[in-house]
Each structure stands twice: as structure tokens, then as C-alpha cells.
Amino acid sequence: MTAIRNIYPSLLTALAALAILAPCASAQETVEADSVDLAGVVEIPGSPSDADIDIQVPSFIRRSANHIQLNGADWAPLRAALEGSARRPASIVMIGDSHIQADISSGVTRSLLQYDFGNAGRGLVSPLKMSGTNEPTDYAFESRNSWIPAKLMSQPWRQTVGFTGTSIRPSSATSEITFSTSERADDAYDPFSSVTIFHQGKMTVNSVTSAGHSVPFRAIPSHDYTQILLERPVNSLTVNFTSGGDLTIFGASLSADTPGVFYHAIGNNGAAYETYNRIGNVGAGIAPLSPDLVIVSLGTNEAFGRFDAQSFTRAVDRLVTNIRQANPRAQILLTTPMECQRSVTTTKKVQVKGKARKGRKARTRTVNRTSRTYAVNRNIAPIRQAILDYGKQNGIAVYDWYDVAGGSGASTSWIDRGLFAKDRVHHSRQGYAIEGRLLYEALMDAVRSAGN
């Protein structure tokens, strides 16, 4: 299969070199079992702004720990890819759960990397809203037609969900779909001059329009994607197509066909290593994106339920192996989840005295009274350790976000500073902005030192 990168032209001169920046429950307590908090969603409107990027990092953040543990991995090729992004766009793919689906932290990382190396385009977009879930606000993936959706955490699937963890299937032979990018906080857009639609089954493009006007195009079909090349960049494109009833669409990549960096983000509420493994072909799915680096940011959802270290490690290894086999040139980076909290329901037996009736004594009865509070999710620490151990044993880089965020006790500090959402699992917008900036700094530190 011809990789997409091979048909991205280079239009500008070389970019500047790398920039330098920077408690167990008591017998009377019952913890809500198997509650996967990240299957829910905390919507945080807006795309990354200058305020997000320039946010002040709190003193309890361990800046001295904000480094990537390479564990013997050679990141010199990644450094070369970024330094050579004027000739071929560098590509980073991030895979995660609802922390990533909202695209706040990943959006900040994307903005900072593209400021340094150039904006190659918005990159991967998924039909999240059409599948009945939340979608990042800097793009729209929509249609006026009827579609059959499927998403990762809603099983059984009506059809395969594909590598993005979501999919849509048209209800009629002739349909149309619109891709558009929204105005960012800096009053700029992410124009695109080519769209690569990832799908299964045959797709025949009949016409494309932008703002109601026909746009000259050339469609290049392939086994698992169709690329549409435009004569001029646009901010919105409607694709009219026909299919034979076997078409399932997983997402699309929007390219500016300019030098720079792609930072593709795949996020699914409630996702875990094992749920991505059920897809079976995540590695092959992302291969057309030609990733130089694949970041896997999972582990929080596994903490809400029974945790078995050996089973978890097998799930990590299965996903990593799947990615490596289909993308042998790509580096892999695992991140650890930071400390979070979970709700604890405490039940106590109390004596309640009833009303006295005439001529009778008041009767006392015993009732159960429940109250809900929060406690540190004690599964996070062993999950973090399992990821650290796996990275060391297999020569895979790890970003220890648990340590960087403040280690044990960090969740209380984050709550006190308003950096957590009310569920004490998700972050606030400010919290995600801090996470995105710190990951960027750690990436730059690792890339600068690579090959030295």
C-alpha cells in the first residue's frame, strides 16, 4: 500500500532548527464496582488558545521529572523527521481515552509543535458526533443523510469500528459527507487541500463542493482509503459519493499539503488497552498516516474495576506488538495515568426513634444510611508501575505523567487548584492545558538529546 506521505508535496523552504522551551475502604464501606468513569464525558468548549499555551505551571508539578524515559530506544530518527519536516511532514499519532477524545491537552501539544515546525494540517478527524458522542470543536464531520453508527464502547458493534474506534455506514447508495475546520482562537483556520477518507468497502466520488461551489478534484482510490486532491485549499468540503452497500467510513485526514507536523489524535470515552485490542487492526489502520511516533495514553479506565497486573501487561504488549508490526519505522511512547479519585459509598447503621403514639412509648428502629465521598483510586499506582516495568523490559519509551503531575497525593493538589473536573477523574480545561504543554516540553527535551 502506498503511504499517504508519499503523495504530500513539499511547498515551502526548510524550517528553523529545534526550538528550546522549555485509603482502603472499611468494612462498612462499599466502593462502586466496575464504574468506568471515563465512559462519561466532560465537555470543555473551544480549541486551544494563547492562554492555554502560556498557562502558568503550578509549583507542585515536578518539572525536574518532566522527561521521557527512553529505556534504550533510539529517537534519532524522530529528531531527523522533525528537522526534515520541510521536505516530508513529520507524523505523530496519539491513541487514548476520553482524556484525548476532547482534544484539549493533545490540541495544546499539537499547537506548540506546529508553531515550531509548521502546520501540515488538522490531520485525523473522526465521525464522533455522528456516532452519538462528543467531538472536538475545531472541526466538523457531518452529513444531511442517514447513517448507521458504531463506537468502541457500545457493543455489540453493528459493523466494524475501525482503527479510530468509531464508524458510520450510509443508509443509502448515494450520500454526501462534509468536512470542515473551525476558526481557532487566534482567528486562523486550518485550510486543507486534500482529504483522505479511511473506509472499508467501495467508495466512488461523484463530485465535491465548497460553500456551494464545485471544486476541481482528483480522486485516488485505494484498498482502505480514498484520497481527494483539490486544486485549491478550502475550509469546508462536501463529498458526494455512491457505494455498493458495503461501505463503512472510519475517519479522514485533512492535509494542507505544506511542510510541518501532523499530530493525529484518536480518543474514545471509556477506552482501555483491551478495548483497542478488540479492534484487532489498530496498527494497520494508522499505517497510512506514516507515523514517526505513536503515543499510547491509556490506563485510567483499567483502574475502575478489578486490576490484575499480568492481564494488564498482556493487553499492553498485545497493542504495542500490533502497532510495531504494522509500523516498524515508528517509535512508541507509553504514558502513565496520573492519580485520580473514585467515589466511595459508605453505609452505616443508625438508630432512628419514631413518634410516640398516645399511650405508647416511641419505638426505635435500625436503618441503613449511606453517604458518598471520594478516595484515591488505589489501582492507579500499580497500573503506573506495570507500564514503567513494561517499558524498561521491552526497550520502549515511557512518559511518567503520574510522577510529573505530582505523584502520590497529586489528586488533592489538583482538586485544590481547580485542575480536576467534578468527577475527580477528568481535568478542567486548565488542567488539560498544563498536561499538553508539559508533554510538549518533554518531547522536545527527548528529541534535542536524541543522537547526542
Image (tube, helix red, strand yellow):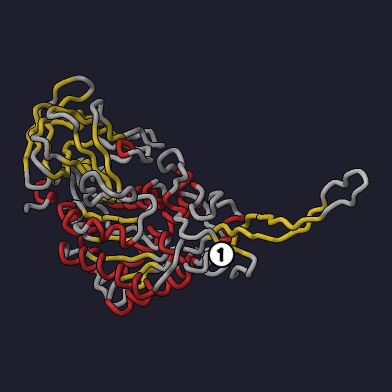
Near-viewer residue (361 or 112): 361
Q: Residue at x 23, y 63 (%)?
A: 78
Apparent side of residue 266 relative to residue 371 in the rendered image (left or right): left
Q: Is residue 419 above or below residue 198?
A: below
Q: Residue at x 11, y 47 (%)?
A: 224
State whether residue 224 appears in this view. Answer: yes
Q: Residue at x 44, y 46 (%)?
A: 41
Which residue is identified by label 1?
376
Near-viewer residue (368 or 301): 368
Apparent side of residue 371 relative to residue 406 in the rendered image (left or right): right
The three-letter code of the residue at mark 1 reads Val
Q: Position of residue 19 (x, y in %)?
A: 34, 58
Near-viewer residue (314 or 415): 314
Say which quarter of the image contains residue 145: top left
Q: Position of residue 389 (x, y in %)?
A: 36, 77
Residue reaching furthest bottom?
393
Q: Position of residue 267 (x, y in %)?
A: 34, 50
Q: Position of residue 4 (x, y in %)?
A: 13, 49
SS at mark 1 in the image: strand
Apparent side of residue 13 relative to residue 271 in the rendered image (left or right): left
Tag 1: Cα neighbours inside 10 Å, few (<14), some, or many (≥20)?
A: many
Total numbered labels: 1
State whether residue 253 appears in this view. Answer: no
Residue reaching furthest right?
359
